Image (cartoon, rainbow, N blue to C red):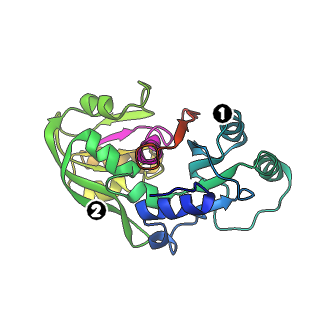
Amino acid sequence: MITSMTTGTLDDFFRSLLDIEGFSSIDLSLNGIQVDNDGAELGKLAFAVDACLETFKRAAAGGAGMLFVHHGLFWGVPLRLQGLVRARIQFLLDHNLALYAVHLPLDHHPQWGNNGVLAERLGIADLEPFGLYHGRKIGYKGSLKTPLSIEEAVQRIRFMDKPPLGVYPFGKEKSQTCGVISGGAAKESLQAVAEGLDLYVTGEVSHQVYHEALEGHLNLIAGGHYATEVWGVRKIMEQCAVQLHIDTEFIDLPTGL
């Protein structure tokens, strides 16, 4: 049990839940601590999908010492500390607010991750890895415990009762199999067609896959990049509250995309 809540001990805790090192070779995100604090102990953790100035302000205003996000600030290339980047970093330092980011490891985890939670909400049984990305399958597929119409599937994955970006009923009236990959995984719909799935759920779609999905008789739901990636962040927040007995807050800042 963690007795002293610092960024170092929280880093150990998050790494005990998520396979952060396992994705280091394919994930451009700098997973883990992206901006540290001055060593102060943490009394509250904030959670959000995106690292941006508004989430930083809300986290600081709520008294959080660390902000956990899915989309961090650093993506595999050096950034000049100028303009918006400088303003964001300056705010974190001025408010002694640590930033922690987890990208693909949070998408992938079968229990705590975005795709695992979505699969559970949809009622997918006998989960199998699905969606090849740089040699790793980061999503899940399987048979639906209860066959679902596309409208019923939408209701199961809606966050805060907001409508999805797009619904494309190109296949069976009731889907019996389903694959799911959160966020920007439009092209993986081609894998869903190739594997004979009835329904594919992701965050975004693109013009390039429309006709393939139509001709492949694939029911397709674009739930929204943001709306499909709140689930893993919130699940990790729950684990922090339960296992660490620390105050937590989810900052909902939807983009509508």
- Magenta residue span: 219-240
Q: CA distance from mark 2 to mark 1?
A: 38 Å
Which of the 4 image quadrants contains residue 157? top left
Q: What element does badge 1 sit on?
A: loop
Q: What element does badge 2 sit on?
A: strand
Per the image, the residue denoted by label 2 is: 129
Coordinates of residue 164 in the picture (x, y in percent): 42, 31
Which of the 4 image quadrants contains residue 154? top left
For label 1, count other residues whose C-alpha is less than 10 Å away and answer few (under 14), some (14-19) or many (20+).
some
Coordinates of residue 13 in the picture (x, y in percent): 48, 60
Q: Magenta span has 135?
A: no
Residue 11 higher or lower than 114, as above or below: below
Which residue is located at x 67 percent, y 34 percent? 58
Q: Nearer the viewer, mark 2 or mark 1?
A: 1
Mark yes or no: residue 114 visible. yes
Mark yes or no: residue 212 visible. no
Which residue is located at x 32 percent, y 51 percent? 116
Coordinates of residue 10 in the picture (x, y in percent): 55, 58
Per the image, the residue denoted by label 1 is: 62
Q: Nearer the viewer, residue 76 or 201?
A: 76
Describe residue 242's horizontal placement relative to residue 57 as left or right. left
Which residue is located at x 86 percent, y 55 percent? 82
Coordinates of residue 176 in the picture (x, y in percent): 15, 43
Which residue extends farthest front? 3
Q: Magenta span has 227?
A: yes
Give amino acid for label 2.
Pro
Describe residue 7's horizontal placement relative to residue 120 as left or right. right
Give amino acid for label 1.
Gly
Which residue extends farthest bottom? 25
Q: Nearer the viewer, residue 218 or 49?
A: 49
